[in-house]
Amino acid sequence: VMKIKPRNTLRTYGIILILYFDSLTISGPIFNKPIFMKTNSIIHTEALHLISNHSGLRIFDVRTGADAKEMYQKKHLQNAAFVDLNTDLADINDPKMGGRHPLPSFSTFIKTLGRLGIDKDSEVVIYDDKNGANAGARFWWMLKAVGHQNVRVLNGGFQFAESQHYPVASGDQSYAEA
């Protein structure tokens, strides 16, 4: 049994979200019920490690920048697939018509989720290299906006998970389409 009683602050787009929870209790067998149903929007490295072999788990690396895909291919969390801000989480045509990263249409985003292997029962964990405060927060919000409940942002992002000895891999990872 593992009990966690943290107080987390996630800074995103100039807004501070303070997320609390009294405890997260994990005991075996932990997959009789989805583990995410009674937790908050943050997952800690230790908890992710405990559920890392669950077949419904989908981990996504959502870093940004000109070299984001290259950095992902060099090193990412084990079993994490890459999500591109520009092509998967935005519909970039003309910046005058919606800014730098306008949201994709609902139908386009739903198709993207299917291509990424996310269905209504998937347990999704998202991280980026900005402590979850960049594209990770955007992807979390977009999933919540379309009604996906089982989605969490990894506390501390890639760097913290790596410092906690979470397994890393290289190359590309993908999930079967849903």
Image: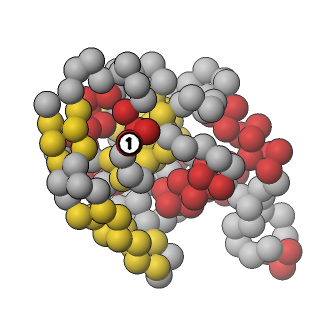
Nearer the observer, 79 or 6? 6
Secondary structure at badge 1 equals helix
Nearer the observer, 28 or 85? 28
Query: Residue 36, image x and y in percent?
Result: 41, 38
Q: Residue at x 65, y 47 (%)?
A: 147
63 shown above or below 1: below
Q: Identify the image quadrant of residue 22.
A: bottom left
Nearer the observer, 129 or 26? 26
Nearer the observer, 56 or 25? 25
Q: Is residue 51 left or right of residue 136?
A: left
Q: Which residue does the numbered mark 1 point to in the structure image? A: 38
Q: Is residue 102 left or right of residue 140?
A: right
Task: Specify the amino acid type for callout 1.
Answer: Lys
Q: Residue at x 50, y 40 (%)?
A: 150
Query: Residue 129, image x and y in percent?
Result: 38, 58
Q: Residue at x 74, y 61 (%)?
A: 103
Can the viewer see residue 18?
yes
Q: Quadrant of the C terminus?
A: top right
140 shown above or below 74: below
